[in-house]
Image (spheres, rainbow, N blue to C red):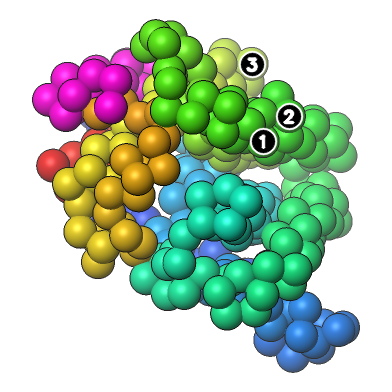
């Protein structure tokens, strides 16, 4: 086995994000869906920008176990649909009450609260339709696709992202311990990032050992990503964030800088990144794309 070949994370992100964009556009057409207004509202948020990190991690997870990333594009699109639905709902007045997302007015500001809720519902439901793609099932095997559906449902639902969001709301900024804060982030953000990597590995034919390594990587990379997001909400610009900076403090949200301070938060993000990188050692060549993406998550802006 040769040495690890370095990967340009930004180029890799750009290449696979473009493929995901093409696939999303093909599967969720601007014209042809009924009722057409519903599809226009769904597309408004889906194509408003974003790095497509979760679907790219899915492609990289597939590649890490020797699979063909093109074969998991339906699952990658499903991940982006669920991520986008979660943002649409998070921005609502009952949740974070944000006016901007990805640099444009939030869905409820443009289309109204009721339509935004329904657009999120539509995107979530569409995701599981994408997971039932016949060609993906032929390539990966029906058993792996069924397991992938279970994995995605668990990560997105009450035991994952949705449950973490509830814990975050209930905490109301009053997080008593680092363990409690990490649990919120593990569920709210980390579950879907871990799922993205593992879903790619599962559908790419990965072994149990490989999937365990991907799970550990995804868990620690997901934590690093959320800590960095917390830091950027304090010191980032609206242009960088795509929304108003300082919103976490205004909403008294539970964050790493609020509990640990900025410098300690940077250290914790770097430590989580190093743990993610260490988890890749059992994978062929050290999974260079995943390693580059983990470094990019932490080092991209500080």
Q: Which mark is residue 51?
A: none
Q: Which mark is residue 158?
A: 2
Rounded to the nearest angstrom, the CA distance separating label 2 from label 1 is 5 Å
Q: How many marks?
A: 3
Residue at disc 1, secondary structure: helix
Rounded to the nearest angstrom, the CA distance separating label 1 from label 3 is 27 Å
Q: Residue at x 61, y 70 (%)?
A: 108
CB atoms of marks 2 and 1 within 8 Å:
yes
* Residue 30 in which image quadrant: bottom right
Rounded to the nearest angstrom, the CA distance separating label 3 from label 2 is 25 Å
* Residue 110 in which image quadrant: bottom right
Answer left or right for 180 relative to 224: right
Identify whether 212 is placed above or below 77: above
* Tag nearer the camera, 3 or 2: 2
List the residue tagged with mark 1: 162
Q: Which badge, 3 or 2, comes first in the chain's sequence? A: 2
List the residue tagged with mark 3: 208
Q: Residue at x 20, y 52 (%)?
A: 236
- Residue 242: % across, % down: 34, 63
Residue count near mark 3 (Cα–Cα under 10 Å), binned few <14, some 14–19, many ≥20 = few
Answer left or right for 91 relative to 249: right
User: Which of the pair 135/107 is nearer the observer?
Assistant: 107
Q: Residue at x 49, y 30 (%)?
A: 172
Residue bounds of the magenta highlight: 258-279
Answer left or right for 218 relative to 8: right
* Tag nearer the camera, 1 or 3: 1
Q: Quadrant of the C terminus?
A: top left
- Residue 260: % across, % down: 23, 19
Residue 223 among magenta residues = no
Q: Residue at x 17, y 46 (%)?
A: 235
Answer left or right for 95 relative to 151: left
């Amino acid at each position: 086995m040769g040495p690890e070949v370095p990967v340009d994370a930004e180029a890799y992100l750009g290449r696979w994000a473009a493929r995901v964009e093409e696939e999303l556009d093909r599967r969720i057409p601007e014209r042809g869906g009924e009722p057409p207004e519903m599809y226009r509202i769904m597309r408004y948020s889906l194509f408003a920008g974003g790095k497509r990190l979760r679907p790219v991690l899915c492609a990289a997870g597939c590649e890490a176990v020797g699979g063909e990333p093109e074969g998991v594009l339906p699952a990658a699109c499903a991940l982006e649909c669920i991520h986008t639905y979660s943002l649409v709902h998070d921005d609502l007045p009952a949740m974070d009450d944000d006016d901007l997302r990805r640099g444009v007015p939030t869905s409820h500001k443009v289309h109204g609260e009721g339509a935004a809720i329904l657009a999120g519902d539509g995107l979530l439901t569409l995701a599981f339709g994408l997971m039932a793609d016949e060609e993906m099932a032929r390539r990966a095997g029906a058993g792996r696709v069924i397991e992938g559906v279970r994995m995605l449902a668990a990560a997105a639902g009450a035991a994952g992202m949705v449950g973490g969001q509830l814990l975050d709301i209930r905490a109301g900024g009053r997080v008593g311990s680092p363990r409690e804060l990490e649990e919120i982030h593990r569920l709210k953000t980390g579950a879907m990032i871990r799922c993205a990597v593992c879903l790619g590995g599962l559908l790419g034919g990965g072994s149990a050992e490989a999937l365990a390594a991907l799970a550990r990587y995804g868990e620690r990379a997901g934590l690093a990503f959320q800590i960095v997001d917390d830091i950027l909400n304090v010191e980032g610009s609206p242009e960088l964030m795509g929304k108003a900076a300082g919103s976490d403090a205004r909403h008294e949200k539970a964050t790493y800088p609020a509990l640990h301070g900025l410098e300690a938060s940077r250290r914790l993000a770097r430590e989580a990144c190093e743990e993610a990188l260490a988890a890749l050692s059992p994978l062929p060549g050290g999974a260079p794309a995943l390693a580059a993406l983990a470094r990019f998550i932490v080092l991209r802006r500080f």
